[in-house]
Amino acid sequence: MNTISRRQFLAASAVGLWSLRSLGEPPAAMNFGADAASLLAEWCDGLVKLQLPEGAFRCPACGIIHGRCAEAGYPLLRMASETFDTHYLDAAIKVRRWSSQMDGGDGSWQADSSATPAVKSDTVFGVIALAEALSYHGKLLVPVTRSAWADRLRKAIEFVFRDFHWKNYANINYLVTASYAFALCGRLLQEPRYTERGREFARKSLEFLTKPSRLLHGEGTPWEQRSPKGCFPIDLGYNVGQSLPALVQYGLLTGDEEVLGPVTESLKAHLEFMLPDGGWDNSWGTRSYNWTYWGSRTAGGCLPAYALLAAREPMFATAAARHLALLRKCTKDGLLHGGPHYVAHQVPPCVQHTFCHARGLASLLDHPQCPQNLGATAPLPRAAAKGIRAFPEINAWLAAAGPWRATVSGYDWFNTKPNMALRQATGGAIGFLWHDRIGPVLCASLAAYLPWEPTNMQPMKEPDFPLTVRLERAVQARRNASIEDGEAEITAAEEGGALVFRVKMKLLPGEMTYRITPENVTIESKCPGAWMIVPVIATATDKIRFETKNQSFEERRIFNPVPGFEADPWIVMPDAEGRCSVTISPRN
């Protein structure tokens, strides 16, 4: 792992934070429908500017053509219906025509023409986009075009009907999402066997809700495999951005309350991981390689789930309002950027973020139950939380003390390939630290930014420096780090008004302790020869003061695409007994 030049400090240090930019909050009541429609128009205009003559979109970040571009045909067609502007219609027809280049020969679409073997499971998302385009806006097309699109849809849903099955078919989001695809096509194409298959898939999906927390598992294969700690393969980003929204839309389309009831409870459980500003804490997820602060990079987003059920659960309205405001704050020049600090660090956005979320937002806006106004008055779970809550299925804990919100993770379900293993937040790491006035303070990234899904992870243009707070120690010319320690043991308790987490590490070995009070957060370690790295989230204009023996130090900024933050990395050297200590507190 590459590092920047180290600045050495004494063991007892303090980080003072002030003037950090919080992402802010939307008003308690908002014209949700109009704001969402305005953002969709902005995204569609951004896509049109990037459209190539052949119909696909140039990606400013990746240097490739993303195979799912055709999904943008749906939101572009919606814009044509709303504005009567033919350039949106022309753009939609062009990108759909281009999609023939991604034909898999068996009814499928390939997600990446260069992949061997071909990746075809994303066909289900193309099915939904095309089916919704025809269902809501098909009358805008001339008969020959409408007929051609319907014929292509039938071939694609037949591929899904033949190919998708419940025996470890890749990650579970494809199968869960297929429930909505089948229901849509059953109605549009008047094919009862699709309708029945949709019901079958939706009911089967409910078996993957964990106990006691009601999180959806299956984002990792094999699904039945448990980690050494007994953890399930779970990813927050794909759950809230694809799977659960699909189940909500399936349930509303079919009136299936036996699905909507459990899914509503699951959405509540997942909402525990939404920060009070509408961001998602997926620091621990099995697919956090695709995590950005607003969710998963290639998903349609959480808004269709929470906004469509807002009448059933008041906190869902708050979630939708907060999240829509965050998406707008991360949008510039018509494109959704992959995190809050992409613009500040001058990192170009991947176009997939925009067309995937545009599809999801169009689906929400076209839905007959889309709310026009939302009252963001009910507090989010994380805003109202106090104390410690455990999630045994992922060996993680949430902590809330005064203005502080924290996640501590010992999750040990990891994705592995030959010669490659991903490590999300683990080893007793602080996955996230958030302050209600400052916003994000600490945030975990991958232990190494490895190209797990190369076409979905935009290239990193600078040395890979993890954002995760950690201990490191050199052992025989190798640098061991606490964030690679899946065997770490964590205990959590409330002691004398403080929330205390004790981590017993196996890899180094050593100990770390986190003490969270309403006033500050203290991180202590004891591990001879190991130094502590504390990357504090901050842009170049944010102010940080690191106090130690009245010395001053030059600040610098690193950047990590997961989840899209800049940080100032402080390195604390141990004392003679191997101890390090850092206290983080806000400044007025």
Image (cartoon, rainbow, N blue to C red):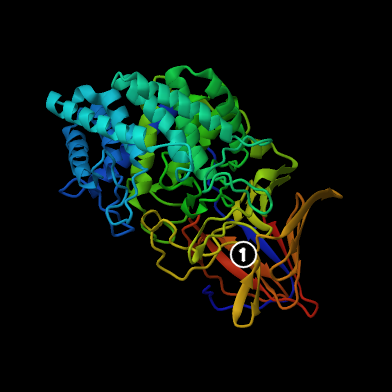
Q: Residue at x 38, y 27 (%)?
A: 182
Q: Which residue is drawn at 43% across and 61% down?
A: 451
Q: In this view, does 290 lie above or below 531?
A: above
Tell me the crowding category of disc 1: few under 14, some 14 to 19, or many 20 or more residues within 10 angstroms, Cα based: many
What element does badge 1 sit on? helix
Q: Residue 219 placed where, x, y %? A: 52, 45
Single out the residue that lies furthest toward the bottom.
476
Image quadrant in which you'd find residue 386: top right
Left of 422 or right of it: where is 351?
left
Q: Residue at x 48, y 64 (%)?
A: 418
Q: Residue 300 placed where, x, y %? A: 41, 39
- Report which residue position mark 1 lands on: 484
Q: Residue 411 placed where, x, y %? A: 64, 53
Q: Is residue 253 above or below residue 359?
A: above
Q: In this view, does 556 lie above or below 454?
A: below
Image quadrant in which you'd find residue 582: bottom right
